[in-house]
Image (cartoon, rainbow, N blue to C red):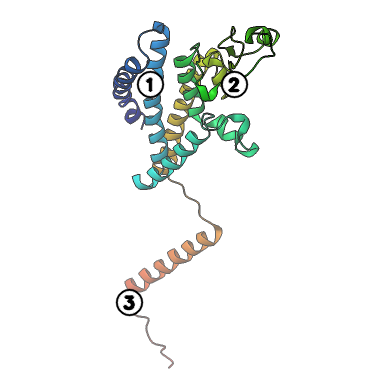
Amino acid sequence: MIANIVVEIPYQIITGFLIWACFYYPVVGVGQSSTRQALVMLFSMELLIYASSFAHMTIAALPDAQTASGIVTLLTFMSILFNGVLQSPSALPGFWVFMYRVSPFTYWVAGMCGTLLHARPITCTPTETSNFDPPTGQTCGQYLSDYLRTAPGVLQNPDATTNCQYCALRSSDQFLAGSNIFYSERWRNFGLIWAFVLFNIAVAVITYWAFRVAKWRSVSKEGKKGSEAKEKSEKVGKRVAQEGAVPPNREA
């Protein structure tokens, strides 16, 4: 089992590198630092290594691939649903918050998004912009001067005297914080995925040994008595066969 897991790792690394090269530069470009580029590449490789270890974990104790595929589909679907992106952690029902914490995609998506989108400026579309008029004789900047000292957003037209346009967000980090994604936790998230990989490998090895190698013998008292009676009956039968038929009663 260990050899089967280890032998796939080089293939997952190569595949992860090819996937990273195909999507990163066409989508993101070359503007980010080399450290962030390398970290995204490592996250891409790590995801495939995790997927391989997860597949081994689910198939190790199951009788066939069809059963394992059903369980993998269910667990993967739940991990994606509760990773904090489709629904923020604060909006999840109280009972299901534990799925947000145990889902490996929570940390993988947070690491990828935090690394790729950190410190990107936000420009609101017209439908995302708040529009209002300042008091007569004041510009938008004068009217919102006190508010803008602590406001997280951007006033797009501070010199206008009508139709002030305010965007509620200034940076991508503000948007990501709503899903509990922070750039400062990128390396922590990278390490946590490796913890999931090691957990998968450990479970795969233990369950393989428990279900396919170890011989579990649990005989109840009734079963033990039944086996002893059967063994005694077989011995009597062998003795009768060796001695021949029982002679008739002479007095009769």
In front: label 2 or label 1: 2
| Crowding at mark 3 (Cα within 10 Å: few <14, some 14-19, many 20+) | few
In front: label 3 or label 2: 2
Identify the residue shown where x is 44% and y is 16%: 116
For residue 59, the mark is: none
For label 2, the residue is 130
Q: Amino acid at mark 3?
A: Gly
In depth, the one of 162 and 171 nearer the eye is 162
Q: Amino acid at mark 1?
A: Ser
Q: Amino acid at mark 2?
A: Ser
Query: Picture coordinates of residue 197 (x, y %)?
Result: 44, 26
In depth, the one of 156 and 209 nearer the eye is 156
Question: Does residue 34 appear in the picture of this structure?
Answer: yes
For the C terminus, the image quarter is: bottom left
Instruction: State how far apart marks 1 and 3 are (Cα).
Output: 79 Å
Identify the residue shown where x is 43% and y is 69%: 233
Query: Picture coordinates of residue 224 (x, y %)?
Result: 51, 59
Identify the residue shown where x is 65% and y is 9%: 148
* First reached walking from the N terminus: tag 3 or tag 2: 2
Query: Picture coordinates of residue 244 (x, y %)?
Result: 32, 77
For label 3, the residue is 244
Proximity of marks 2 and 1: CB atoms separated by less than 8 Å: no
For label 1, the residue is 44
Instruction: State how far apart marks 2 and 1 are (Cα).
Output: 38 Å
Identify the residue shown where x is 59% and y is 6%: 159
* Secondary-structure class at tag 2: strand
